[in-house]
Amino acid sequence: MIRYFEAFAGIGAFRSAFEKVGGFECVGWCEIDRFAQKAYQDMRRYLSLSSVAWQGLC
């Protein structure tokens, strides 16, 4: 498992790609743009909720 810190995170595109590839663990992220921060947090919340919902359906 490769651990990384996501600096200049934007909306989390690199994190999403690393999660799809597998073998990476994000230990933190940083973004100064408040709109990008909000989008990043909302996307992370949505993805974590959708993964729980999918696990329950399978």
Image (cartoon, rainbow, N blue to C red):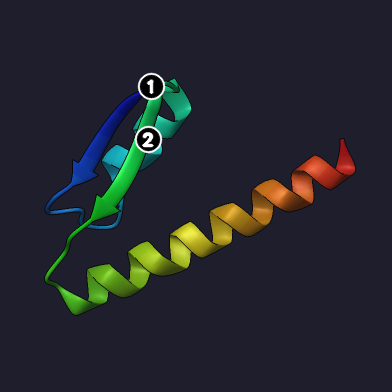
The residue that appears at 24% across and 76% down in the rendered structure is 35
Quadrant in which the N terminus is drawn: top left
The numbered disc on residue 51 is none
- Image vertical order of residue 22 relative to residue 6, above or below: above
* Position of residue 8 measured from the top left corner of the image (x, y, whole percent): 12, 54
Q: Which residue is situated farthest in the right direction here?
A: 57
The residue that appears at 13% across and 50% down in the rendered structure is 7
Mark 1 crowd level (few <14, some 14–19, many ≥20, 10 Å Cα): few
Name which residue type carries label 2. Answer: Glu
Name which residue type carries label 1. Answer: Met
- Image vertical order of residue 15 relative to residue 32, above or below: above
- Image vertical order of residue 22 relative to residue 4, above or below: above
Quick check: 49 left or right of 38? right
* Position of residue 13 measured from the top left corner of the image (x, y, whole percent): 30, 44
Are the residues tagged 1 and 2 within 8 Å (C-beta)? yes
Quadrant in which the C terminus is drawn: top right
Q: Which residue is mark 2?
A: 25
* Position of residue 31 measured from the top left corner of the image (x, y, whole percent): 16, 64
Q: Quick one: SS at disc 2?
A: strand
Q: Which residue is mark 1?
A: 1
The residue that appears at 85% across and 46% down in the rendered structure is 56
Quick check: 44 left or right of 35? right
Mark 2 crowd level (few <14, some 14–19, many ≥20, 10 Å Cα): some
Quick check: 44 left or right of 8? right
**Closest to the observer, 26 or 21:** 26
* Position of residue 4 measured from the top left corner of the image (x, y, whole percent): 24, 36
Q: Which residue is situated farthest in the bottom direction here?
A: 34
